[in-house]
Amino acid sequence: RIWKRAPDGAWHCSDVLEGVHESTVRSCAWSPDGKLLADASFDGTTAIWEYSGGDFELVDTLEGHVNEVKSVSWSQSGSMVATCSRDRAAWIWEILPGNDHECVDVLEGHTEDVKMVQWHPFFDVLVSVSYDNTIRVWADDGDGKWPCVQTLTEAGNSGHSSTVWSISFNQKGDRMVTCSDDCTLKIWDASIDLSQPTTGEGHESWRHISTLSGYHGRTIFSVHWSSEGVIASGAGDDAICLFAEENSMVEGPSYRLILKKEKAHDTDVNCVRWCPQNPRVLASVSDDGTVKLWELQGDILD
């Protein structure tokens, strides 16, 4: 469903995109120019819609995954789309003239479901997170292949001990945050120039700098970093938490809880996203069938 805000501030459903998928639509993402919308479905396909002349038209369907597609993400240039699936793979698709799409590489390395893929905000670097408890970083080797250049694990990098569900970058692109079934959020810092990624395993571009624990009582399904530096998380405990970096004299960065919105929904909070135009407005969706819009005013989310 496409929602538009009326002059009186109310939100109305303007379009319903249907008749394409045979199962649940799990994820959707707008292209950087706002002209294309990609949606990923449990039927194993990803649909590409074009918004033109006030209407949405299906322009392509990406097929190739053998199981449910869990996530879809556009590169910062809008020239590539990444998808990931229960089939343990991530696919990178190149946008061709006429809204055609071609798979340029299949990224294999995860040993379980790939839950989410996310492009870096400035560079052609892709991050994937998985049911195998790991975070993988992929980069173009210059020859059209996308090898894994780093794997973040519990043993080697102070990573997660259970399924990693979501990942988000900060505005500068030098930090990312991940969340997990282990009920923690982890902050990662890029220690080198990401525009010059090194190929091959063992590339140490990202390092763990902070773990936020004890704030959610059940699986943290979603995390998103606002342009103002506020991290939002949504979890299976029906709550939304907000965090921000605090100025501290101790060595290394630290983050504090700004607020926790208990019972934000009647059941699991599956996704949280900050508005790109107004970084104080947060959207949340839930298994209770609702989408809620919140505004951060000081230390109050209402």
Image (spheres, helix red, strand yellow):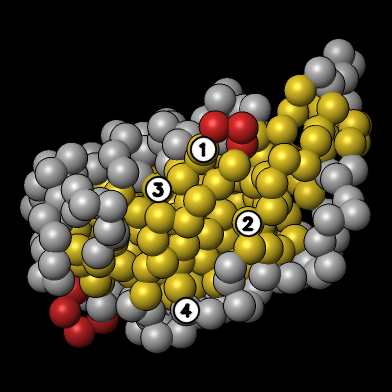
Q: What is the x, y in percent for residue 188?
A: 25, 57
Q: Earlier in the sequence, mark 4 or mark 3?
A: 4
Residue at 67% over, 70% down: 44
Q: Secondary structure at mark 2?
A: strand
- 88 relative to 91, above or below: below
Q: Secondary structure at mark 3?
A: strand
Q: Nearer the viewer, residue 266 or 32?
A: 32
Q: Which residue is mark 1?
A: 96
Q: Secondary structure at mark 1?
A: strand
Q: Is residue 258 visible?
A: no
Residue that numbered label 3 is attached to = 119
Distance between the alpha carbons at the discs numbered 1 and 2: 13 Å
Q: Secondary structure at mark 4?
A: loop
The residue lying at 39 percent from left, 86 percent from top is 111
Residue at figure coordinates x 71%, y 33% from the top left: 50
Q: Mark 2 is on which residue type? A: Leu
Q: Quarter of the image holding residue 19? A: bottom right
Would you name the residue on which mark 4 appears? 88
Q: Which residue is mark 2?
A: 62
Q: Residues within 10 Å of mark 1 (few under 14, many from 20)?
A: few
